[in-house]
Every structure is written in structure tokens, then in C-alpha cells.
Amino acid sequence: MVKMTIVGRVSDGLPLAQGPRYVNGENDNLLCYKQQGEFILKEISRGALVPSMMTIRIDHHSLNYLIGNGVCFMTLCDSSYPRKLAFHYLQDLQKEFEKLDNSLVEKITRPYSFVKFDGVIGSIRKQYIDTRTQANLSKLNANRKKDLEIITEHISEILQRKRNSEMSEGLPATTPRTASPIWGSPLLEVIALKWTPITTIVAVAAILLWASLVLTDNFII
């Protein structure tokens, strides 16, 4: 089942249209998936996700996206829904979107305000609800190897890379010198540099004095 669709602009990650959503008891979860879809759109926009076609595993769902001519077409499906059909659906959306005036798309500034395309999404989505229609079965049987070319990742991997990126960006340009595990404080390092030579001299003098006393005692005996 195609549960959610997002069409977004790659240049700035702005979601343009979403079409009708699958409505049932999962509405709260779908809102969470929608937020994750918007996050993926932002990651594509900043260049963190390079593939033009990709499947992202989220719980028991698959988030599939397709990029073409600066626009990202994304859909959330059950994990059991044929991935090939999901990408046929996205390709059909892309074909219809390319018929529109691109200058109008560039002028959009508010999220999901391109309502003109919502009806197109709903109309095409209806064609992919039943996977057993003759048209859909023909699509599934054609080019069987094509499905293997699509990169698949789990959402946790993408989130971890995002966290790593944010951590690395927060560090100074050069890695600071690692402090000594014993003298971790700069003040203690200064004290160590100042008193270590003196302490060494005192220790050596004490050892020499002890040795001389031992030798003297042995000589007297």
C-alpha cells in the first residue's frame, strides 16, 4: 500500500506537494514518517544522500525516493509492497510533473502549497493500490534485474551519519593536543615542569647520603 507521498525541491529541501494520505489508525505514526521524509529531503538537499534512487527502511515500511531535474519524488509503502511498483509510481509522478511550468515551481515559498499537483498524485496513486492488476503485474515482470540496482539503507544509518557530521563540524579546525592522563590540568603541568627537576636532585642527594652512611658504617665495623 502506498501510504504517503512527498514531492520536494532539491535545491532547498522545500516540500511542495503531498497528495492524499492513507488514513487509518496509524495517523500518528504517519505524522512521524512524514517528518522523517522531510528530514530525508533536507539530507538530499545538503548533499548527504547522493543516489538518485534509493530505498530507506523505516520500521516495517520502505521510504522510496527518485530524483529528477531538481525535484525529489518520495513515497512511503509497507515493506511488503513491491519496490519495483513503488518506483514505477514515482516515475509516473515525475512524468506528470515535468509537464508543468518549471518557473511556477521555483516561485513556491511555502511548504506543501503546490496544491495543483495534489490531485495528480491522488489520481496516479489509485492505479497502484491493487498490485494484482494486469498493468501492475506487467510492470513487475519486466526488467527483473533493475530492482537490484537500487541502493538500500536503514534510517538509523543515515541518522548516525548526521550525528557524526554535526559532531565533526562542532570541533576546531585542528585537533587539540591530547593532555597527559596524569597531568591533565594545565596548572598541574606547569607545577610538574617546575618542581620535577628539583625533586629529582633532592632524591639523588638523599640516595647518595644514604649510600655514604652505609659505607661509613661498614668501614667502622
Image: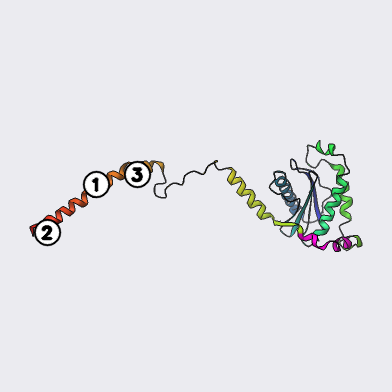
Distance from the alpha carbon under mark 1 to that under mark 3: 15 Å
Q: Which mark is residue 192?
A: 3
**Image location of residue 46, percent across then percent down:** 69, 43
Query: Quadrant of residue 130 in the image?
Result: bottom right
Query: In the image, is residue 18 above or below residue 106?
Result: below
Query: In the image, is residue 199 above or below residue 219?
Result: above
Which element is circle 1 on?
A: helix
Q: What residue appears at the point 18 percent right and 53 percent down from the top-left corner? A: 210
- The residue nearer to you, when weighing 220 against 60, is 220
Which element is circle 3 on?
A: helix
Identify the amino acid type marked 1.
Val
Q: How many marks?
A: 3
Distance from the alpha carbon under mark 2 to that under mark 3: 38 Å
Distance from the alpha carbon under mark 2 to that under mark 1: 24 Å
Which element is circle 2 on?
A: helix
**Image location of residue 39, percent across then percent down:** 71, 47
Query: In the image, is residue 33 above or below residue 13?
Result: below
Q: What residue appears at the point 19 percent right and 51 percent down from the top-left corner? A: 208
Tell me: 166 left or right of 204: right
Question: Mark 2 or 1 closer to N-term?
Answer: 1
Residue 145 belongs to magenta span: yes
Identify the amino acid type marked 3.
Ala
**Image location of residue 161, percent across then percent down:** 64, 51
- The residue nearer to you, when weighing 149 against 93, is 149
Q: Which residues are magenta?
A: 136-148
**Which residue is tagged 1?**
202
Query: In the image, is residue 106 above or below residue 94?
Result: above
**Which residue is tagged 2?**
218
**Image location of residue 122, percent across then percent down:** 87, 50
- The residue nearer to you, when weighing 148 against 26, is 148
Question: Mark 1 or 3 closer to N-term?
Answer: 3
Using a 10 Å C-alpha cutoff, classify the residue at mark 2 as few (fewer than 14 neighbours), some (14 to 19) or many (20 or more).
Answer: few
